[in-house]
Amino acid sequence: MTYTEYRSTHPEVSVIIPVYNEEAGLKALFARLYPALDALRTTYEVIFVNDGSRDKSAAMLAEQFRARPDTTRVVLLNGNYGQHMAILAGFEQSRGAIVLTLDADLQNPPEEIGKLVEKMREGYDYVGSIRRERQDTLWRRKASRAMNRLRERITHIRMTDQGCMLRAYSRQIIDTINRCGEVNTFIPALAYTFAQNPIEIEVAHEERFAGESKYSFYSLIRLNFDLVTGFSVVPLQWLSFIGVILSMGSAGLFLLLVIRRFVIGAEVQGVFTLFAITFFMLGVIIFALGLLGEYIGRIYQQVRDRPRYLIQTVLEAREALPTPFAAVTTPAPSGEHIAQGDSHR
């Protein structure tokens, strides 16, 4: 089906917004998002995915659905599965020819959506974004830049700003992602591997409107571990190379000590040097076990074949019903709502 044919029966633009404890900024998001999308003068849908929020976010999303049922859909997950799982849930619900992801904290202004849509209309199938004049703290900017360089060297995936969630994807890429069954993944990098004609553009960046970032230092480390181990075996190759070097060095040191023992005799002056070398090698071994554990853990999670998330409720308009809208509120017996015959795993 061509792009034009698909647009004749589906909205042109789908915007996926994961939400987790964002009640302080949702009203401001609504006030800016819908005018920005109306200005595109095209068909669109907004899919909010509530990722197990513990505040009033879910109630506010339901209220917004009642206010704009023609363009709003709300997916309520039955727990907190993380930002990327929430986005994948939105992908499976999306119907647009162009699918965009946007954070709910207004650090990426909704008014920038038009830039990405225009680039997609030019024929690109993946539009990444680079934050201009980032408003994050200094350590986050430095850490992000360092991880970008390391990730590019390891995975050969070239994304200038991997932390910016404002991105646009073609329908073909979204359908391909939906067929993937990976338990842990990094969506922008995964989409990049499927893109044939990607591009990056600069977008504005603002300070977080309200609340605090949900990404802790540990979360950022975990995200980058998922990114590296999910798209490359280079760390294992590096580990093997380091093991060979250390083995050769240890063998040489052993021969040197044996020769010194017979030539000079017994001595204790170098005992602390031996301790230092031993501790260094122990550190390398512990790091190696941790790295192997990352890969084995990914295999373990994958072979269990458990659902990646469970959908409790989907609020969406039903054109077939005489009423203006109908909310799907009856969960499946397992706690998962399956809409239109789709399975969520």
Image (cartoon, rainbow, N blue to C red):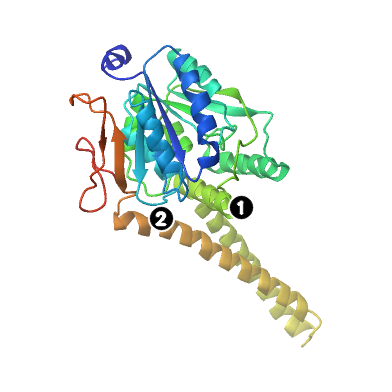
Mark number, residue 109: none
Q: Which residue is mark 2?
A: 298
In the image: residue 21, left or right of residue 146: left
Q: Amino acid at mark 2?
A: Arg
Q: Residue at x 57, y 52 (%)?
A: 221
Mark number, residue 217: 1
From the top left corner, tell me how far across and down residue 4 is, in percent: 31, 12
Q: Residues within 10 Å of mark 2 (few under 14, many from 20)?
A: some
From the top left corner, tell me how far across and down residue 71 is, in percent: 36, 24
Q: Residues within 10 Å of mark 1 (few under 14, many from 20)?
A: few
In the image: residue 319, left or right of residue 190: left
Q: Residue at x 35, y 43 (%)?
A: 76
Q: Amino acid at mark 1?
A: Phe
Residues under labels 2 and 1: Cα distance?
21 Å
In the image: residue 88, left or right of residue 163: left
Whether residue 40 is situated above or below residue 150 in the rendered picture:
above
Q: Residue at x 65, y 66 (%)?
A: 249
Front: mark 2 or 1: 1
Furthest residue toward bottom: 266
Which comes before the other along the chain, label 2 or label 1?
Answer: 1
From the top left corner, tell me how far across and down residue 28 is, in percent: 54, 30
From the top left corner, tell me how far across and down residue 48 is, in percent: 41, 35
